[in-house]
Image (spheres, grey):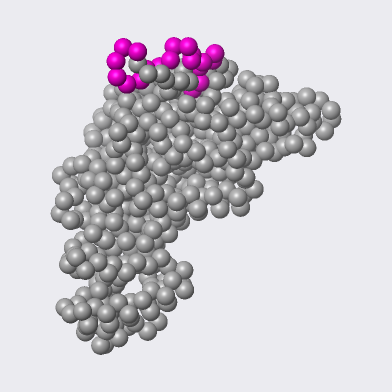
Amino acid sequence: MAKEVTKRSENYSQWYNDLVVKADLAEASAVRGCMVIKPYGYAIWEKMHEVLDRMFKETGHQNAYFPLFIPKSFLSREAEHVEGFAKECAVVTHHRLMTNPDGPGVVVDPSAKLEEELVVRPTSETIIWNTYKNWITSWRDLPILCNQWANVVRWEMRTRLFLRTAEFLWQEGHTAHATRQEAEAEAMKMVNVYADFARNTMAMPVVVGHKSPNERFAGAIDTLCIEALMQDGKALQAGTSHFLGQNFAKAFDVQYTNKEGKQEYVWATSWGVSTRLMGALIMAHGDDNGLVLPPALAPIQVVMVPIYKSDEERTAILDRMDQLKKELESHGHTVKIDDRDTLRPGFKFAEWELKGVPVRIAIGPRDLQNGTVELARRDTLEKSSVSQDGLGRHIEELLAEIQKNIYAKALKFRDDNIVKVDTWDEFRTRIEDGGFLFCHWDGTTETEEKIKEETKATIRCIPIDSAVCEEEGKCIYSGKPSHRRVLFARSY
């Protein structure tokens, strides 16, 4: 089965597509640009959901839900916002179908035209701030710390499973604050929550930074992000947190009475991550044999494969596996016994390697007799024989080691592919090799757009927590003075 996956060195894009489909994560649907997330893929997303939801609630946020449909007039209230999303909006114009009077099938009922057209949610700032107007009158009503788990629709022309689809799943936080300082602190707090999740749960190193003005979220005053480097040298924006200022509060007239009795506009943030994280997980860690899942996100952390020649051996081995499974589950691990008798062990090994299960345990008659198991690590493909006694403790330590090793490998790759570049000729050459190029930039949108036009590279972020380099220099493109380096890369 693993041989059915294209090698990364041959065609990275095809390797990615093979992995998504053949590891049973997702597939294209009958609806153009949309995907079906299959049970195994959704189980990984559920794990992400579970961890992030807990982290949000630990920081004081509550879940809510807002409508899928947004009156078209709402989007026009914030000029930058509507400009940023107008080309991606799906619009509902009618609310009923009718039997086709001229033949088979159905057609739109022309008498069912909506009084106001509805936009299918591309993001929820407008509908939420229209709602917050009803919730906020006094400083006592603040802050509001809401998050929603939802689907959104952005009518992408070029789609790719998980990375860019017309409909995708995400969470979006929307908060309201009495002061600018509180809102800015919230935006910073949440981007660091995302960074913590990426590093410690996804085992994926990220750089935290500010987006350039040209790359900010539509309608934001400041956008913070986490940027990761994929194995093909392209960057992936894995999460964003936006300081929205008072733009949406003014657009929807959301004011509160402060402690001095004066009316003030509310300050806002929004922040989100999506099923794009699934794509990041695949591309950051996968290899030519398939997925490599960090134990923290693996739906199955340990798979057990019995090896036998007779029914008697099969029964004895499965009985022992049942006992070991209970022991491992008592340590909090998710375990599956692959007792299918229609497949050879080798086929099972390849299948579970493809699906990225962190640890595989095989038990044959000799293992049963000796009180041992054969362990195989997915991250290194190393095998070892260990005692069945104390197996639960051993697996616990091994899973922790695997989680750390996956992160260390990805971190080394990222750090090895951050390159300081000081000349335009070198930039044009090095960008073809991929990676983060750490360069001086003069701070102008004009220069940024020229670089993108000529090389397809964009400023991924202005780093604030790693790869920070504030130093005097000259912009690689214009030669004008620069006070710090920023990260350029081609991206997904």
Q: Is residue 105 magenta?
A: yes
Determine the residue positioned at 64% across, 48% down: 60
Position of residue 30 measured from the top left corner of the image (x, y, whole percent): 30, 33
Q: How many marks?
A: 0
Camera-side residue: 217 or 60? 60
Q: Quadrant of residue 31?
A: top left
Tell me if residue 367 comes above or below residue 111 in the rendering: below
Camera-side residue: 316 or 483? 316
Q: Residue furthest bottom?
A: 369
Q: Is residue 317 left or right of residue 94?
A: left
Q: Is residue 249 magenta?
A: no
Tell me if residue 395 comes above or below residue 51 in the rendering: below
Position of residue 309 measured from the top left corner of the image (x, y, whole percent): 16, 78
Q: Quadrant of residue 473?
A: top left
**Magenta residues (range):** 101-119
Quadrant where the image shows the N terminus: bottom left
Tell me if residue 400 comes above or below residue 31 in the rendering: below
Q: Is residue 488 left or right of residue 81?
A: left
Position of residue 362 measured from the top left corner of the image (x, y, whole percent): 26, 74
Determine the residue positioned at 30% across, 77% down: 318
Determine the residue positioned at 48% across, 11% down: 111
Question: Looking at the image, can residue 470 be seen?
Answer: no
Quadrant where the image shows the C terminus: top left
Tell me if residue 230 comes above or below residue 139 in the rendering: below
Q: Residue furthest right?
A: 260
Q: Is residue 412 left or right of residue 61?
A: left
Question: Looking at the image, can residue 47 be seen?
Answer: yes
Position of residue 245 measured from the top left corner of the image (x, y, whole percent): 62, 28
Determine the residue positioned at 22% across, 64% down: 348
